Amino acid sequence: MRFLVILFIAMPIIEMWLLIVVGQHLGASLTIIMVVFTAVIGLHGLRSQGLSTFKRLQDKLLSQQLPAKEIVEGLILAIGGAFLLTPGFITDILGFSCLIPFTRKLWLKLFFTWFQFRLSPLHQEPFEPSRFDRSGPSVSGDTIEGEYLDSHDEVK
């Protein structure tokens, strides 16, 4: 969470600094034209990539398959579109990386790896013994015995 706060504070500062530096070297009007041009080109690419992703999502739904990859691709495309609408060169690079199919696959892989790590039980390693499967005496040494009644069994 702290990382996001730092990122939201640092990114605009870095973008403004970079825009000023580029503006000093190329001129303000050329810098503004570059920012607008990358946004227009990026949004055109976003439209075509979004439509193809939406078509694949519909095809998966019609064949009664779960379109998880297509949903995440749509999310990545939406994030890329937000980056492209944000003025700046770093956000444009991030936005275009979400649009290009090769780099979008890298973002997909990163997302699924992160998501799988978050969902793993207590971040268990693949060859580590399970923390839930313990046989033998309990850690405290106390054994509790008892009987139970399954709620599906009828009492007669």
Image: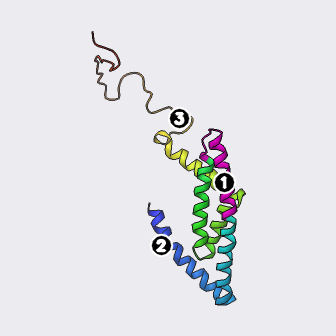
Seen in the picture, residue 1 relative to 40 is either above or below; the reply is: above
| Badge 3 amino acid | Glu
Seen in the picture, residue 10 relative to 27 is either above or below; the reply is: above
Circles 2 and 1: CB distance less than 8 Å?
Answer: no
Q: CA distance from mark 2 to mark 3?
A: 39 Å
- Mark 2 vs mark 3, foreground winner is 2
The residue at the point 68 percent across, 80 percent down is 34
Boundaries of the magenta span:
46-68
Q: Quadrant of the C terminus?
A: top left
Neighbourhood count class around disc 3 (C-alpha, 10 Å): few under 14, some 14–19, many 20 upward: few
For label 2, the residue is: 9
Upstream in the sequence, badge 2 or badge 1?
2
In x, y percent, where is residue 113?
A: 59, 48
For label 3, the residue is: 128
Q: CA distance from mark 3 to mark 1?
A: 38 Å
The residue at the point 69 percent across, 68 percent down is 44
